[in-house]
Amino acid sequence: METSSSEKEKHLAAMKAVTYIKNGQVIGLGTGSTADYAIREIGKLVQKGLQIKAIPTSKKTQELAESLDIPIIDSNSVDYIDITIDGADEFNEDMVLIKGGGGALLREKIVASMTRKQIIVADSSKQVAKLGLAFKLPIEVIPFASNYVMNQVRGLGGTCDIRHQSGKIFVTEQGNWILDANFGHIKDPQSLSHSLNKISGLVCHGLFIDLADIVIIGRGNEEETIARKLS
Ligand SMILES: O=C(CO)[C@H](O)[C@H](O)COP(=O)(O)O
């Protein structure tokens, strides 16, 4: 499975994140290759008797969890989630994230909002001094509104492309489209988030602000933990 140093770092971060899980908890399962390492480890613990219930953030994650016999529950059956383990495409020193590379940002943001302890797992390449330079900001839009939203994004200083996959427009699990927006260096994520949230037809954007409680970074042969608040 591990083919490169970044895979090793993802694995190390995921293994550490899983140690936070306690018996009886409701666990949010993120989407992406780093979250997958954690899900596989949770599967092993479930086999050994750990009792948890899980809420997946995508069909792919749900399929992986089901294949490992991790019990799945409906997001509407609980008022909160104890711990979620998810990846990120970028994060900065303030633990502001860019997510949505895998297109699951809407469910990921809902699950993060419901979560008491959001743990982000990442390889060291995801840590950036300047958000938005290496990775474009994913924006989920209702297809009907895509041109309008693109014009509004231009008004905010960004440019964007409709995400394609295998030559076709990428359609999210909610039936929406993703715009990958380039704002250059996002100096003021709060202000940009606030402006984007006001655009009609924009369902969700990939800036996750004040949602991560812990970031675990794989770095070489070790992992490093950054915590936002005591718990
Ligand atoms: O936001 C995400 C999916 O929408 C992922 O968490 C993000 O893309 C990181 O993925 P990976 O762990 O494969 O690098």
Image (cartoon, grey):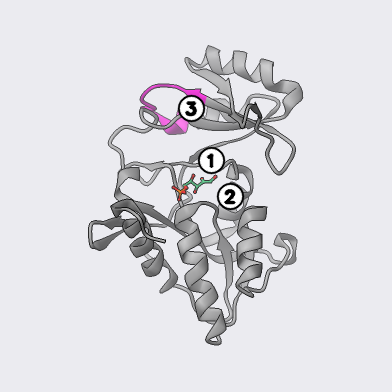
Residue at horizontal 59 percent and vertical 82 percent from the top: 51
Of the numbered discs 2 and 3, the one sitting upstream in the chain is 2
Characterize the local packing of mark 2: few (<14), some (14-19) or many (20 or more) Cα atoms within 10 angstroms: many
Percent position (x, y) of residue 100? 53, 40
Q: Which residue is drawn at 58% across and 43% down?
A: 105
Task: Report how far apart the C-alphas of labels 3 and 1 lie in the structure.
Answer: 16 Å
* Mark toward the start of the polypeptide (3 vs 1): 1
Residue designated by label 3: 192
Q: Is residue 216 visible?
A: no
Residue 190 shown in magenta: yes
Q: What residue type is labelled 2?
A: Glu
- The stretch of residues the image draws in magenta is 181-191
Residue count near mark 3 (Cα–Cα under 10 Å), binned few <14, some 14–19, many ≥20: some
Residue 141, by quadrant, is top right
Examine the image and state in which quarter residue 64 appears: bottom right
Ligand 1 has an atom within 8 Å of the beta carbon of the residue at disc 2: yes
Task: Name the residue that disc number 1 marks.
Answer: 100
Magenta run includes residue 171? no
**Quadrant of the image for the C terminus?**
bottom left
- Residue denoted by label 2: 108
Q: Residue 27 carries which label?
A: none
Is any atom of residue 206 visible in this view?
yes
Label 3 sits on what residue type? Leu
